[in-house]
Amino acid sequence: MRHDVDLPDLAAMERFGAAIAARLRPGDVVALSGGLGAGKTTLARGVIAALGHSGEVPSPSFAIVELYEPPDVRLPLVHADFYRLTRPAEAAEIGLDDYRQGAALLAEWPEHAGGFAHEPGCLAITLEHTGLGRRAIVEPGSDWLMRVPCP
């Protein structure tokens, strides 16, 4: 079931990130799609901050994968930006499955890694520009149906 969430400003984006973080479990994937500048990294930063991280959250654009571990965050988290991948097999080549063991995954540009929507633990979010704000189109996998972070 699709949900649309209006995110008119940065505060709304941070609240939405906190709502996702409150429901996030190991094994989950939050797949963040949208064009350049749509707010994927901003939303990811909101999730990571709400999980307890108080330091800087670098964009994983060049490193591809950034790891966050307890006690810095509530649960192990992999923040990945797959923009630079040229084929989905590269996700396996960088050891994505190993990183994901026992962790949640925030995946920017998930389609470059072959996508995750087929996984029951995937919360697919597409961000779109709406004037000065954003809209999140949220499509939960079956594991998210009872915990969708939408009004």
Image (cartoon, rainbow, N blue to C red):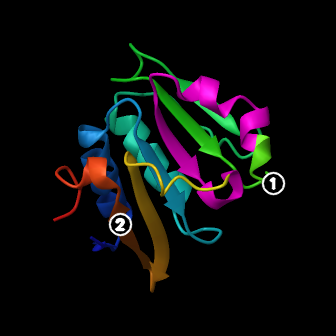
- Position of 103 with respect to 111 (left or right) is left
x then y, percent, for residue 43: 44, 54
- Residue 57, compared with residue 73, is above or below; it is below
At x 55%, y 48%, the residue is 107
Dividing the picture into quarters, in which one does residue 93 lie? top right
Nearer the observer, 75 or 97? 97
Which numbered disc, 2 or 1, marks the residue that appears first in the sequence? 1
Residue at 29% of width from left, 53% of height from top? 142
Q: Is mark 1 on a helix, strand or loop?
A: loop
Can residue 57 be seen from the camera position used here?
no
* Magenta highlight range: 91-113
Residue with the most extreme right position: 86
Q: Does the magenta stretch include residue 64?
A: no
Of badges 2 and 1, the one in the foreground is 1
Q: In this view, does 60 lie above or below 149?
A: above
Report, in whole angstroms, how far the alpha carbon at label 2 lies from the one at label 1: 25 Å
| Residue 44 in the image, given as x and y percentages of width and height | 47, 48
Nearest the viewer among 93 and 75 is: 93
Q: In the image, which disc is placed on residue 138?
A: 2
Q: Position of residue 16 (x, y in %)?
A: 30, 56
Q: What element carries label 2?
A: strand
Q: Where is residue 97 in the image (x, y as percent from the top left)?
A: 61, 30
Which quadrant is home to the N terminus? Answer: bottom left
Q: Which residue is drawn at 43% across and 60% down?
A: 124
Residue pictured at 36% horizontal, 65% vertical:
139
Q: What residue type is labelled 1?
A: Arg
* Crowd class of label 2 (few under 14; some 14 to 19; many from 20; radius 10 Å): many
The disc label shown at residue 87, or none: 1
Most extreme residue toward the bottom is: 131
Q: Is residue 50 left or right of residue 131?
A: left
Give the camera-side residue of 109 and 140.
140
- Of the 4 image quadrants, the one containing the C terminus is bottom left
